[in-house]
Amino acid sequence: MADFPFDIVGFDLDGTLLDTHGDLGEAVNHAMALAGRPRVPMAKVYGLVGGGSKRMLARALDLTGGMVDDDAFDRLHGSLLDYYESHISVHSALYSGGEAALDELAARGTKLAVVTNKLEHLAVRLLDELGLSSRFYTILGGDSLGPGKAKPAPDLIHAMIARGGGGRAAYVGDTTYDTGSAQAAGIPCIAVSFGYNNKPVDALGAAAVIDHYDELVSALERLG
């Protein structure tokens, strides 16, 4: 198995490795209630996710009546994060086939990482609560490297590779934030069609698309 083409495989979190829309939706709707807004239907939460919690909140406000002033936004954002942190793993879970794919990649000697725009401490807490943290040599969040370094900038991908000791890397994501970051870092990105795609999956600019995690390892082998 030493001939596997990638030394490192990184994963986006929300909508890629984990289906988190239930818990994110409840946190968004907690903020909407505080703002006196109607609930966002869970079916519409998929379209809110991507780019971090502030973008998610802004999209929800736009959807339910428009933006609020900066002070109100900051209060709502803080309340959203507090609620989410306290209810972070109620509904969230690996996508079908995800555990087997992680097992197979580890058996190939591939180092695994998480690179997300979610705040690092929230990403770590979520993975801890789901018993997944030990699978990853690093967990990088949108705030891990400071302002302006989140996806689609390439900095988090570069840090992922550096922390893994270098080598050939690939990334798995579900939005243009993911494909853009990978492309800027010069590595291939596989898009998952079952995630929170902010464009049609074939328009994300990914090197390959998978419809189930059963397809991941073979897709990586083809890219290699």
Image: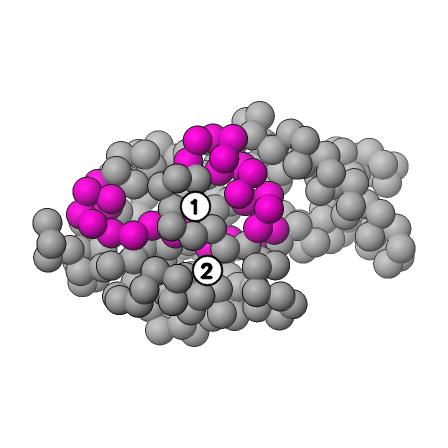
> Who comes first in sequence, dot 2 or dot 1?
1
- Residue 165, relative to residue 115: is it above or below? below
Q: Are marks 2 and 1 in contact (CB under 8 Å)?
A: yes
Quarter of the rendering containing residue 201: bottom left
Q: Is residue 54 left or right of residue 6?
A: right
Residue found at x 44% / y 31%: 131
Quick one: SS at disc 1? loop
- Residue 202: image location, x then y, percent: 37, 58
**Residue type for callout 1:** Thr
Picture residue at 42% right of the left edge, 42% below the top: 17
Name the side, left or right, on which 110 lies relative to 71. Answer: left
Q: Position of residue 95 (x, y in %)?
A: 39, 35
Which of 100/46 is in front? 100
> Looking at the rendering, in which quadrant would you find the C terminus?
bottom left
User: Is residue 94 visible to us here?
Assistant: yes
Residue 6 is situated, as x and y percent measured from the top left of the image, at 23, 59
Q: Nearer the viewer, residue 58 or 65?
A: 58
Please provide percent x and percent y for residue 79. 79, 40
Q: Which mark is residue 178?
A: 2
Residue tagged by mark 1?
Answer: 16
